[in-house]
Image (cartoon, rainbow, N blue to C red):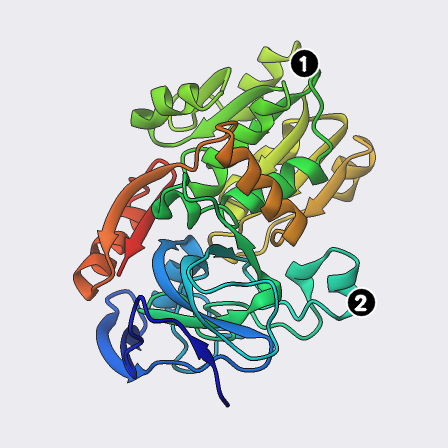
């Protein structure tokens, strides 16, 4: 297939890509040379400018997450890049433009895409999961999965606008957070949590951030948390939430952790409380007493990604300074850089996200 390529960066026929040789507690990773992908129908070729290191990547590398992971896939779904080539049938995307990718290679044509649920595209594979992602020099993605990024947003921040920022925004929207609400955010120091704190605060809500990293308290306060609870210190944090709300409970809770905090999270909810579930860090089963849900008239919602319109909203908010993508560390896209990212994320060291740059 012929492609239109640009002259300002000459496209090498081969590229470097991070390869997971062996997953596990002590994974083996290496950089390999692969053919530079050619964009297929409706696709563009991006030079990767930055790619976030998500807990999803850690779970695949450690061997915990295997379901749906394509054999030999290049990881990395938090991608920002520069368009260097397009397929002949692509309109409206110009070489030289900066973009950020959705987490799913959305087709843009199925009923879910047309309904604005591109993250659940019926035909699209997960980027860095079912198809190659951004831990490489180049990546080919559908034009329908890309949103332009203004030059004022640095690449290391732009990489985070879909995940974690867009996913956090989706959770705030799903939980219908209003200015009068009290909102609890668990795992508040991580990538999803730090951005959920920001977005809930921009809605005018009182945000109670829960963390197990006391060194992140001042950072969370700077992101908009009204109160930060150190979950390692003192009583069950649901008791603290009840005390702070005069025993009414929280109007909404955004949970980025999952089983380790269950059922404490549920006990935080007020009558008619809404819980948005974003994370499951262990994959373990949890006990659920239905009466706890029924007599709270609780709403428990799963949030799995970010739509194109949500991503556009996070881009606009970052461009106008309403939110700040939270980058804790920028590391090179090398095996050494990945090993350091694994060490940091496994130790829950970063406030926000670690970003890799080729």
Can you give x and y, in whole percent of width and height, for residue 60 in the image? 40, 66
Q: Is residue 205 above or below residue 124?
A: above
In the picture provided, is 76 more to the left or to the right than 305? left
User: Which residue ends up furthest to the bottom in the rendered image?
Assistant: 1
Callout 1 secondary element: loop
Residue bearing mark 2: 111
Q: Tell me the residue at 17%/61% (across/down).
A: 336
Crowding at dot 2, Cα within 10 Å, few <14 / some 14-19 / many 20+, comes out as few
Mark 1 / mark 2, whichever is N-terminal = 2
Say which residue appears at 45% left-offset and 24% top-offset.
223
Task: Residue 247: give its label.
Answer: 1
**Direction from residue 32 to residue 352 in the image, left or right:** right
For residue 73, which numbered disc appears in the image? none
Q: Residue at x 74, y 70 (%)?
A: 109
Depth check, mark 1 against mark 2: the one in front is: 2
In this view, the residue in front, 126 or 47, is: 47
SS at mark 2 in the image: helix
């Amino acid at each position: 297939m012929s492609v239109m390529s640009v002259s300002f960066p000459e496209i090498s026929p081969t590229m470097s890509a991070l390869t997971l040789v062996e997953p596990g507690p002590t994974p083996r990773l290496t950089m390999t040379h692969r053919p530079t992908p050619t964009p297929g129908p409706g696709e563009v070729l991006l030079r990767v400018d930055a790619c976030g290191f998500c807990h999803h990547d850690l779970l695949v590398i450690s061997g915990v997450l295997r379901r749906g992971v394509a054999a030999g896939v290049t990881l990395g779904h938090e991608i920002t890049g520069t368009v260097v080539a397009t397929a002949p049938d692509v309109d409206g995307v110009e070489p030289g433009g900066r973009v950020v990718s959705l987490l799913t290679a959305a087709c843009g044509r199925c009923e879910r895409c047309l309904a604005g649920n591109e993250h659940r595209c019926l035909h699209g594979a997960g980027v860095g999961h079912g198809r190659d992602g951004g831990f490489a020099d180049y990546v080919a993605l559908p034009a329908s999965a890309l949103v332009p990024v203004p030059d004022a947003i640095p690449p290391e921040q732009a990489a985070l606008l879909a995940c974690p920022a867009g996913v956090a925004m989706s959770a705030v929207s799903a939980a219908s957070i209003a200015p009068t609400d009290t909102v609890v955010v668990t795992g508040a120091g991580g990538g999803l949590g730090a951005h959920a704190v920001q977005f809930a605060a921009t809605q005018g809500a009182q945000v109670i951030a829960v963390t197990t990293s006391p060194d992140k308290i001042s950072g969370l306060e700077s992101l908009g948390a009204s109160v930060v609870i150190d979950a390692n210190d003192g009583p069950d944090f649901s008791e603290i939430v009840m005390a702070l709300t005069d025993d009414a409970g929280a109007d909404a809770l955004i949970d980025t952790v999952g089983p380790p905090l269950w059922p404490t999270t549920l006990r935080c909810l007020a009558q008619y409380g809404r819980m948005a579930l974003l994370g499951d860090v262990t994959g373990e089963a949890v006990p659920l007493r239905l009466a706890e849900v029924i007599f709270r008239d609780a709403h428990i919602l799963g949030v799995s990604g970010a739509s194109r319109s949500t991503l556009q909203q996070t881009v606009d908010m970052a461009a106008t300074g309403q939110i700040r993508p939270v980058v804790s560390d920028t590391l090179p896209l090398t095996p050494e850089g990945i090993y350091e990212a694994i060490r940091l994320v496994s130790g829950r060291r970063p406030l926000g996200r670690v970003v890799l740059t080729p």
